[in-house]
Structures are given as structure tokens and as C-alpha cells.
Image (cartoon, coloured by chain):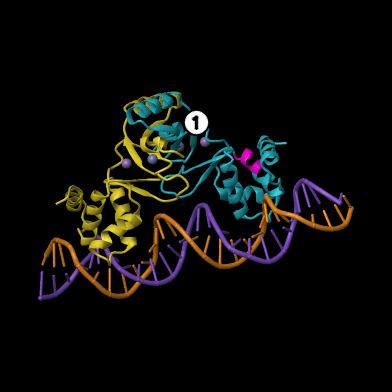
Chain colours: A yellow, B cyan, C orange, D purple
Amino acid sequence: MSNLVQEVNLRLQSDGGRMTTQRRLILQALERLSDHPTAEEIHALVRKSDPSINLSTVYRTLRWLESLDLISSHHLDQNKHQDRFDPVSATDHFHFRCEKCGTIIEFNDPAVDDLVASFEARHNCQVKGATLMFYGLCPDCQSKKD
Amino acid sequence: MSNLVQEVNLRLQSDGGRMTTQRRLILQALERLSDHPTAEEIHALVRKSDPSINLSTVYRTLRWLESLDLISSHHLDQNKHQDRFDPVSATDHFHFRCEKCGTIIEFNDPAVDDLVASFEARHNCQVKGATLMFYGLCPDCQSKKD
DNA sequence: CCTTTTATTGCAAATCGTTTGCAACAAGAT
DNA sequence: ATCTTGTTGCAAACGATTTGCAATAAAAGG
Ligand SMILES: [Mn+2]
Ligand SMILES: [Mn+2]
Ligand SMILES: [Zn+2]
Ligand SMILES: [Zn+2]
């Protein structure tokens, strides 16, 4: 049984709720689509196993998983008002997006914590989360001609 | 004459195009609404001077200004798929958003450049832009009871 | 000035991504 | 096997933004 399915089963035991075929399929899809799929992309994949599954069920399930902090969502595309889902919780990891081919590279840097600390000190704020995003050209797209 | 209006007139001279009353009003609104207004908020303000101005004109003008790199837009609200416009170009400045009252604080930190440099070196990428966003509690909301 | 050209507008309708109400369904407890 | 109620599919509503098009009005040229 997949990792996410297990994790969800634990939550269901403590919080109540039901494991359904739809939920199982969506969780499995999230694990296969490790990149940052849209709801439509997840829908397309689960439909291959169960063509009757509805897009609204996909959305409901994704939002539910988000509220459980098992996945997260971001606005990764600029000029697109579309959520992309991250099969990984909001643990601090950040994104680079290639403006040419759309590739997403994930990264982490402990120096962000220093940035946060410095900002908190300067502005007397309490920072609970951060999103950091770089845009530019990936190695492949740099070498290609324009 | 306002700063933005002047800047736009320069662009019109070199690139062609027309200065209209609608554009002038939208530019002035952008200067007055220094916070991060939505298109609707800008529309509401310009309507006070010219009630016949249409929301689609506001959008068209904002997107045009964005393409000229005179303003920028961000997804500042989480869980809201709405653009907020920044009367300032995409010069590197970042945002903190209070999760309780919605206040936006702008800040800058040269250490972000180091972060970028470090990422570029590690991943052989060329970074052209960055967005950084913190969420948490502003000074006021920290002191208030929950 | 007046005419002409064409960039820009207002309007209504279309589009995109997402959410919601509700009756039908099915998980899983009894 | 039955019952309860959480979950689903469907269709419709929704919020934000964009688009096609005929009407309007800048500003250039006479
Ligand atoms: Mn990610
Ligand atoms: Mn700003
Ligand atoms: Zn690329
Ligand atoms: Zn606050």
C-alpha cells in the first residue's frame, strides 16, 4: 500500500471519515505525478482506472488533503490562475521555473531561515511560512539557441 | 502631471499608441492606491471620476502596463485566485502578508542575491527574477488575543 | 479647423479554474 | 444483512479575467 494511503488511513482512524476507491486512486496518482500536477492532470490519470470519477471529487479530495497538511498547492505558473498540487506537505522547499520549457526544479537552502529571522527582527513580525520562487532558464534551455 | 503618466507618454512617443482619459485615470489611480489593489478596486476608484469606464478597459490597461514593465502583478492572497497589482515594476522587492488582518508589508534584502547566486551555481540555472513571500502575524495581530 | 485613420473603448458574451447544493450511493459500524 | 451517514456524480453557480465586435475618439495631415 502506498505511503500516502497509509498516512490517510491513520488520519481517518483518529478523525473519522471513509477510505473510498476515488480517494485511493487520487492518492496513488499524487504519488506517481511527482512533478506539480494540476487538478485536471490528476483527473486525467485517475480516469484511466475509473472513468466515472468526477473532477469535483478530485478538487474536494485535494482540498481535504491540503487541510490535513498532507499536500500543498502553489501558483507556480505566472500569468496562469491555476493551482498546482504538491504531493509533499508545506515543508520548506522552494521552486525554480524555467521560463522557456516550464520545468520545475525544487530546492532548499537553510539561508532562507536567516532571511526570515532578519525580517522578523527588523519588522517585529512573526513569520510562519515562506514561499520562494525563481524564474529563468534551466541548463538545457540556456544552451539552445533562441 | 503624474509620474506614471509621464513615463507612459514617453513610451507612447517611441512605440506609438494613444493617451486616453481612461488610461490617464487608471494611471492616477495606481499612484493613489499604493497598496496592492485588485482590478476591481482600481475600477471602483476611476469610476468616481468617470462612471462609464468599463472593467475590461481596466484589465486591458493593466496588462498593457505590465507588458511595458511599468507595473507588476502578484498572487498575494493565498486561497484567492485574484491578481493584485503593484504600481511598481518588478524591481526586486518582496512581501509579507499578515494571515489575520491581510496587511502587506514590503521589504527588501540583498541576501536574496546571495541565495540566487548559490542556486545558480548549484543547479547551473540562469535566474532572471525572484518572488519571495512570507506569511505570519504582523506586530498588531501578535499582541491581540486570538 | 475639418477630415481621415486606426488605436482604443464599452458592452455582452465567452472562457477558465474552481466550488457548491443536492439526491443517489456506498463504506463500514452495529 | 441492515442502517447510518460520509462521500460521490452531476449540473449549475461562481469569481476572475479575457475576447469579438461595432461604436468612439485620439491625433495626424490637410
Ligand atoms: Mn514542490
Ligand atoms: Mn509590492
Ligand atoms: Zn528549460
Ligand atoms: Zn495583522
How many badges with numbers are in the image? 1
- Indicate yes or no whether the magenta region holds residue B28: yes
Q: Position of residue A71 (x, y in %)?
A: 29, 46
Amino acid type assigned to the residue bearing label 1 in the image: Asp
Q: Can residue A130 be seen in this view?
A: no
D27 or A82: nearer the eye? D27
Decide whether the magenta segment is chiefly helix, strand or loop.
Answer: helix
SS at mark 1 in the image = loop
x, y percent for residue D6: 24, 60
Residue B53 visible within the image: yes
Would residue A43 be found to the left or right of residue D23 on screen? left
Q: Identify residue for label 1.
A: B92
- Residue B108 magenta: no
Residue nearest the viewer, comparing A126 with B68: B68
The residue shown at (67%, 34%) is B3
Image quarter of residue A120: top left
Subunit of label 1? B
The answer to which image quadrant residue A49 occupies is bottom left
* Residue at image location 32% in from the left, 34% down from the top: A107
- Does residue B138 lie above or below D9 as drawn? above
What percent of the width, then of the height, locates residue A116? 38, 28
Specify whether tag 1 is near ligand 2 (CB below 8 Å).
no
Within 10 Å of the Cα at label 1, are there few (<14), some (14-19), or many (20+) other Cα atoms? Answer: some
**C5 left or right of A133?**
right
What range of the chain is rendered magenta?
A: B27-33
Side of B73 relative to A10 (left or right)? right
